[in-house]
Image: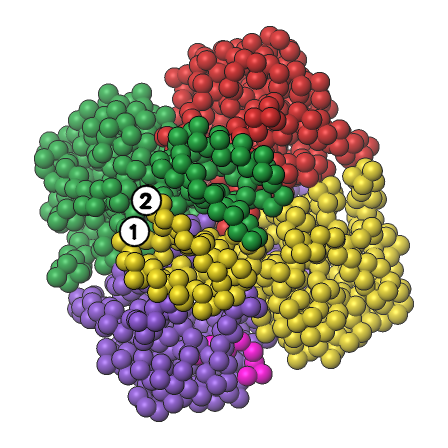
Chain colours: A red, B green, C yellow, D purple
Amino acid sequence: MIAVIKNGTTQKQLDSFCEWLKSQGVGVHLSTGEYQTVIGLIGDTSRIDEDMLNGLEIVESVKRISDPFKSANRKFHPDDSVIDISGTTTVGGSIFGAIAGPCSIESEEQIITVAKAVKASGATMLRGGAFKPRTSPYDFQGLRADGIELLLEAKKETGLPIVTEIMNANHLPLFEDVDVIQVGARNMQNFELLKELGKTRKPILLKRGLANTLKELLMSAEYIMAGGNENVILCERGVRTFETYTRNTLDLSAVPMLHELSHLPVIVDPSHATGLSRLVKPMALAAAACGADGIMIEVHNNPKAALCDGPQSLTPEQFDDVMKAVNKVLTVVNE
Amino acid sequence: MIAVIKNGTTQKQLDSFCEWLKSQGVGVHLSTGEYQTVIGLIGDTSRIDEDMLNGLEIVESVKRISDPFKSANRKFHPDDSVIDISGTTTVGGSIFGAIAGPCSIESEEQIITVAKAVKASGATMLRGGAFKPRTSPYDFQGLRADGIELLLEAKKETGLPIVTEIMNANHLPLFEDVDVIQVGARNMQNFELLKELGKTRKPILLKRGLANTLKELLMSAEYIMAGGNENVILCERGVRTFETYTRNTLDLSAVPMLHELSHLPVIVDPSHATGLSRLVKPMALAAAACGADGIMIEVHNNPKAALCDGPQSLTPEQFDDVMKAVNKVLTVVNE
Amino acid sequence: MIAVIKNGTTQKQLDSFCEWLKSQGVGVHLSTGEYQTVIGLIGDTSRIDEDMLNGLEIVESVKRISDPFKSANRKFHPDDSVIDISGTTTVGGSIFGAIAGPCSIESEEQIITVAKAVKASGATMLRGGAFKPRTSPYDFQGLRADGIELLLEAKKETGLPIVTEIMNANHLPLFEDVDVIQVGARNMQNFELLKELGKTRKPILLKRGLANTLKELLMSAEYIMAGGNENVILCERGVRTFETYTRNTLDLSAVPMLHELSHLPVIVDPSHATGLSRLVKPMALAAAACGADGIMIEVHNNPKAALCDGPQSLTPEQFDDVMKAVNKVLTVVNE
Amino acid sequence: MIAVIKNGTTQKQLDSFCEWLKSQGVGVHLSTGEYQTVIGLIGDTSRIDEDMLNGLEIVESVKRISDPFKSANRKFHPDDSVIDISGTTTVGGSIFGAIAGPCSIESEEQIITVAKAVKASGATMLRGGAFKPRTSPYDFQGLRADGIELLLEAKKETGLPIVTEIMNANHLPLFEDVDVIQVGARNMQNFELLKELGKTRKPILLKRGLANTLKELLMSAEYIMAGGNENVILCERGVRTFETYTRNTLDLSAVPMLHELSHLPVIVDPSHATGLSRLVKPMALAAAACGADGIMIEVHNNPKAALCDGPQSLTPEQFDDVMKAVNKVLTVVNE
């Protein structure tokens, strides 16, 4: 970490600052230039608060040289992490994760039909929303506990591991038989929830927040990992920009960038990112082409009652088509 | 609500769509133009999901004409809401709210010193962070329950009502004697927390999320109000943009815009918005000038140990100077 | 176009508004709902200014139903446009455009070496910057007219059509033998320049601005096409967001979205979008996978003098590797 | 400027890098830490390209310590610049600049009526659009040369100095009698235009681009100043964000921030920033309260033909009310 000192700082102020830094357990390296004095902080600076330093009267600016994330950092863990999913499949290794299912769980018939269909098309996991974060209190909030029951039925029926979102740490007992717990974009910085998930050993699918940087995503992963749970799967699902044709702007460069910064697997959710079912296929192919470890796709079973489909849901037939095309791309990319 | 129908839609599809809409309890008004067919939805459309309609195959686009928020809507509640704060002061009426105090509560001596100082300068409430949302798990997480105890000591000493942030609904029992409960920007869409706060009757200070629209802020207020708690204070604290000199970009046009849309009071937090103590005064004056119902400012007591100050904290002397200037502006603005 | 009328509007105001609309040559369809009055504007509304309507005292909001772009609109031109490049190659048809070359033209030796190398790897066009838009007046501004001379030398040597950026319509005479004229992101809304380019019949490579929507990009294409020049190639090159690891955020969903909205070809520039050479390959593959009509990549010839490379430049060897991988992806995607 | 070197860099690479830096005329200070090697660049680094360094294979990241702008920098010019406007008024000194007038010049009667009205209310300059940058080629493009003629008539009639926008350096001869030349947001990085304006000695009103940082705004000012024209007035007019209620998001913290970074005067345009006439007054008051050197406001003369008003225009009566309120705020702020 480097702190650039303001011109006009007295030697006494500088000494007092250096003393304090040493008291925090970091080494200090002073470099006095013609125009500017710069202090290098040496050692473990992960506990030094960048914002705090930045606010000191004598400090012009601060630059963190080493990353503030440790457990998630590829520098200290060069090999890709492979997350085991209940002994049934993995994410991050040689298996491309394909997580599919409906936005909301609606009925036993619905979830089992979808589960069977997506399994037949090559899905490795089943997703389904039981607890639904909705912008409006007047919108459907999900079947909640009943939804998880139905998801477990579908798991029993098909053998597919299940992924579903948690919104409240108090609900954790309901997730005992859930294979992967999802943290939604709006809860990416719900640190109290992350801490509780860090105490479990469940795989956590952590979605990037609407306006969060990759560094913040990795720091949220760090919250979970600092608690001892290293089973984190990162998920890019689009960020908020000024563009209005698509719901969010899918940031696919996040995939190779996260792979460079971290050893954790990275999957892509083209359904929520674009909000438009007709963009799901091209974006799923692009995700596979740029090295994603998996995709997460909304699939709904009832094309006749299309009225209840989310705008971004595929039919099972469309999902089958996407999977065939994705597999072709994977073949040439992994050659 | 208006739905623009895609060209090429068959009469049968259209009829089936209109039938379904009627089954949802809304009236339907069909307008067939030369180039485009448009359906008007009449009646209470607040339960119709805009995203869902938008995703239907036959729908080109959707426009909501009436606002999706009801309880927070000025149309149905023309008069300004005045939030009573434990019978001691108000926010939203003729009293300009001035909430001041340290970012983090550190010690009894600190919080009481600051409380006395800001009260002398005209603060109407004391703030202090007990539970601290931090991007990094390695940063100081606040004194937590002990912090609230110290805050209550300061309240007893000065009579100032206290404001502090909640991060977990399970902590609510600790907030029994807290006068105003703050929901931080990162939890603005923590809907499970909002629902729990809707069950209380405490004033809730709801901060706008980093990348949330004013409509989303009002929908989050609606979550609290739908539970029966109408005591919501909105807070603009800067949004995330590409600019890097300031931590966030303070959106002061939110103040008159929110006043137009809603009857709820609106305060401004220039400390977090800019992240720079030297910008707090000009932004506090600007907030007062454009009609804010109050300001929220970080004040720290120990200029000698400036190292522990947040970058955006004022000294009590600086806060006093800000209050004097703000009061002058208020005088001419309210003339 | 639909205008929602404010409650409280008098019949007289409404009548006067409708009269005025008719005088502008559009039909008017009035729909009076229980809560809201809505006016539908029928006919050619492309000359009605949405912002102007929106600002009228009696108007609550406005929604444009038909697109404001005509010449670029796929609705009126369902087939893909294929842009002929000097009879040598095309963009938008069955040939995948591969435009490669250095950020800045530096010397005859440099540009000819790169031209030969990229041609050998399958590039269909040579790019090179002669006029360089630089944020700082103190940075290198390009070889300007001399740069174009060198580019023409390389064209003569290799037969590759050439692409280079224009910053000033007064320079048009220098571009007489240039095959494709590029408009950079910063000039996407330099309407005076676009109008002049509309008078030529040269293919124009129009880059999306840093913070411009797809609709604005298409409106800028419309400026060129309205002048009679239909040879427009759109280029996605990343938009500005809050993310800092990458220079910009590449918006690949723009590719299928633009294909849906317009018949114009769409290429992708992964070099400028990411600003990092190590992200160019994965993003080029992703672009090919999601249906782009071509890519534009920075290639520099002198790996030994790597110091002068732009951060996003590839060596000819790296470009060759990218092209091989892209071609494999194209094979399976076009199957 | 500081360059952090990647781990794994060989001594030979490091030596070669240092040699090259010295050949560019900057001194080099090497600091080898336990975890990281850092190179400090000493001397005039304004000609070193940050992006280029950042892209070198051996460089992990770069931090510029000194600002890249020189002429606009307050460090080298501590006193506020006062821009003389044709000997009639100033911007940046003790006079608060009040620039008012219609968005588009429509007729002699219109512009003269508005000019007289705004002068009576205290405007110090008259604005009016002759050349209009419009997103759509089908929208009204302004009266162009004729508009400037009418503006000069109004100047003759009232004595008010005039401000109008230039879109093309070729039009400069038409601006000979214009007092202040405006560069619009879309042309903020039209560097060819800026260079031409640098050759004049006219005051230039430079508007911040829709998505440009304050540093980029100052670098564009630098383009003009590097040509010898030091008469630059900066203008904040809102930036593009995700918010949709307002057209742009007015960034008022830019005012004190620019004052800290630069000696150039800063004015605020609340009309374009918000796009809503009813937000102009509160934002004008806020601008005055936070230290702006002036405001720029759209005023239209014909409330009866309100249909042609831009959505953000005030009537002369409303402008008079704004000026009275602004003057009161200025009185207490400047006490």
Q: Which residue is mark 1?
A: C7
Q: Are marks 2 and 1 in contact (CB under 8 Å)?
A: yes
Whole-percent x, y for residue D321 in the image = 21, 69
Q: Does A101 appear above or below B96?
A: above
Q: Secondary structure at mark 1?
A: loop
Q: Chain of mark 2?
A: C
Taking the spot 36% from the left edge, 37% from the top edge, the residue there is B43
Using the rendered view, name the quadrant where residue D128 is placed. bottom left
Name the element at disc 2: loop
Q: Please, is residue A2 above or below residue A263 in the view?
A: below
Magenta extent: D164-171
Task: Say left or right for C234 vs A2.
Answer: right
**For marks 2 and 1 on the same chain, the one whose residue lies earlier in the sequence:** 1
Sort mark 1 into few (<14), some (14-19) or many (20+) by Cα contacts within 10 Å. few
Residue type beneath disc 1:
Asn
Q: Residue at x 41, y 16 (%)?
A: A171
Residue A16 vs residue A182, the one in the foreground: A182
Instruction: Name the residue beneath numbered marker 2.
Output: C35
- Residue D182 in magenta? no
Q: Residue at x 60, y 46 (%)?
A: B7
- Image quarter where the C terminus of chain B lies is bottom left
**Image quarter of residue A174:** top left
